[in-house]
Image: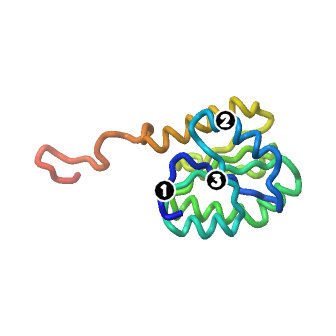
């Protein structure tokens, strides 16, 4: 796992079993050249210590998953967004799982409310991931202003 794979989207599993909607979403995202890989919270922590950029997808559609997310996962994700190159994509029917007002400007946090069609969401997710990987949203200009002589202002 040391090598960065841009065609993988990591599905953070919030329960003991892999849910059935994982397979449906994986089937919808495969035509876009992406694959979903299920992982638990411990796997996520060990993987992100390598420092590679990665895309993590979280699906919250039940009260038990929402409670688990808010108690155990949310603080860890806040840390990963700040310190590592992790891009978070959350699909949830609960608005109180959203931190978009804090991390929305960073470009690393994407929240979508349910209900939404899986095919349309898979297309939007693949488009957003490709834009991030290809750097289409980056400003091509300089980071600092300089004068004609090359001195920083």
Tag 2 secondary structure = helix
Q: Alpha carbon of mark 2 to alpha carbon of mark 1: how far?
A: 21 Å
Tag 3 secondary structure = strand
Q: Which callout, 2 or 1, points at the residue further toward the start of the chain? A: 1
Tell me where residue 140 appears, x and y as whole percent. 33, 39
Query: Which of the labelled discs sits on residue 95, or is there none?
Result: none
Which image quarter holds the N terminus? bottom right
Residue 47 vs residue 134: left or right? Answer: right
Q: How many marks?
A: 3
Label 1 Cα crowd, 10 Å radius (few <14 / some 14-19 / many 20+): few
Tag 1 secondary structure = loop
Q: Alpha carbon of mark 1 to alpha carbon of mark 3: how far?
A: 12 Å
Tell me where residue 123 appears, x and y as whole percent. 63, 32
Residue designated by label 2: 122
Give whichever of 107, 132 is nearer the camera. Answer: 132
Q: Which callout, 2 or 3, points at the residue further toward the start of the chain? A: 3
Residue 10 vs residue 105: left or right? Answer: right
Task: Determine whether 129 is above or below 124 in the image.
Answer: below
Give the quadrant of residue 44.
bottom right
Q: Which callout, 1 or 3, points at the residue further toward the start of the chain? A: 1
User: Which residue is drawn at the image coordinates 47% and 60% (left, top)?
Assistant: 3
Residue designated by label 3: 10
Label 3 Cα crowd, 10 Å radius (few <14 / some 14-19 / many 20+): many
Q: Alpha carbon of mark 2 to alpha carbon of mark 3: how far?
A: 14 Å
Residue designated by label 1: 4
């Amino acid at each position: 796992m040391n090598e960065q794979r841009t065609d993988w989207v990591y599905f953070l599993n919030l329960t003991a079993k892999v849910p059935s909607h994982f397979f449906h979403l994986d089937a919808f995202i495969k035509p876009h050249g992406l694959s979903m890989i299920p992982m638990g919270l411990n796997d996520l922590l060990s993987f992100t210590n390598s420092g590679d950029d990665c895309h993590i997808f979280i699906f919250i559609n039940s009260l038990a998953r929402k409670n688990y997310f808010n108690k155990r996962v949310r603080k860890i994700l806040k840390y990963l967004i700040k310190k590592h190159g992790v891009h978070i994509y959350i699909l949830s029917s609960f608005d109180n799982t959203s931190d978009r007002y804090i991390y929305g400007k960073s470009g690393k946090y994407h929240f979508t409310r349910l209900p939404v069609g899986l095919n349309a969401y898979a297309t939007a997710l693949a488009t957003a991931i490709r834009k991030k990987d290809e750097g289409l949203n980056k400003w091509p200009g300089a980071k600092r202003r300089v004068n004609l002589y090359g001195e920083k202002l």
